Image (cartoon, rainbow, N blue to C red):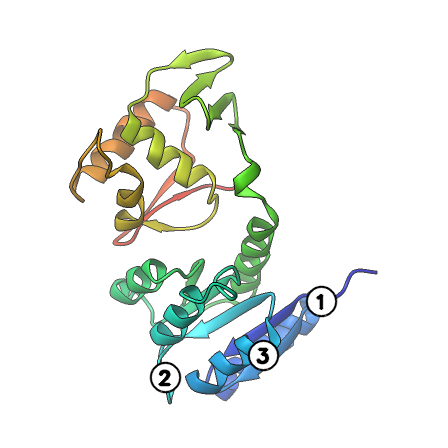
Amino acid sequence: MSLKKRILLIEDEEDIAALIKLQAEMAGYKLFVETDGVNGFRAVERDRPDLVILDIMLPGQNGFDVCRKIKSNSELKNIPVIILTAKDDEIDVVLGLELGADDYVSKPFSPKVLFSRIKAVLRRRRETESSAKMVKFGDFSLDIDRYLLKRDGKSITITLSEFGILKRLLLNRGKVLTRNQLLEDINNDDAFVVDRNIDVHIAALRRKLGPNFDWIDTVRGVGYRFKED
């Protein structure tokens, strides 16, 4: 019998914590709660949970600082973090993702939606990106080593920038990536772009992948996500 996944919730609102704890037990997870940022980070260091759910507005130390400390620590950075943000607060979402958070859920939220995100993030963690040489999706395949995109074995012309964006999206299926995160992959000696051009590259990718290909979602005000299905 496999051990239950351990989740650390850092949240100071008792009613929200109780709701999440109940849903965690129903979903088969073991959940621990800390109510402030300082003790929350200490718990991450001490217990090394399988996943952290992190509220932004916390006493002692805010969620941004906690996320930054987790993701800048070589021993902790691979622990997935899901941030809880105020409804429609795009600035919080973008900042959290750029600090390394793996996903976000906006308040008020459905517990079922939250645990669907948790399941997806934990599944992504199990995938070994470093060993991925050929990524397949639908009728397409992306050859990581050879910089080739093919559909049914036939090559599709793709620029270096488009390749970088598609690779990053594919290797992070289901995860929202900001424009700045995608920009990191296509700023190189061969292709210099500015932030606004990310949207142009996405539009070009969509055209090349065909009118029936609708797997790249636009997340308004934040960035893009490659659908998991």
Query: Is residue 205 found left or right of 144 in the rendered image?
Result: left
Where residue 81 appears, x then y in whole percent? 48, 65
Q: Quadrant of residue 50?
A: bottom right
Q: Quadrant of residue 56?
A: bottom left
Where residue 53 appears, x then y in whole percent? 50, 71
Of the two numbered discs 2 and 1 on the same chain, state the one appearing first in sequence: 1
Measured Cα–Cα span from mark 3 to mark 1: 22 Å
Q: Which residue is mark 1?
A: 28
Does residue 197 lie above or below 116 as drawn? Answer: above
Residue farthest right in this picture:
1
Quarter of the image with the C terminus is top right
Q: Where residue 61 is drawn, which disc sits there?
A: 2
Badge 1 amino acid: Gly
Q: Which residue is mark 3?
A: 46
Of the two numbered discs 3 and 2 on the same chain, state the one appearing first in sequence: 3
85 and 201: which is toward the camera: 201
The mark closer to the camera, 2 or 1, is 2
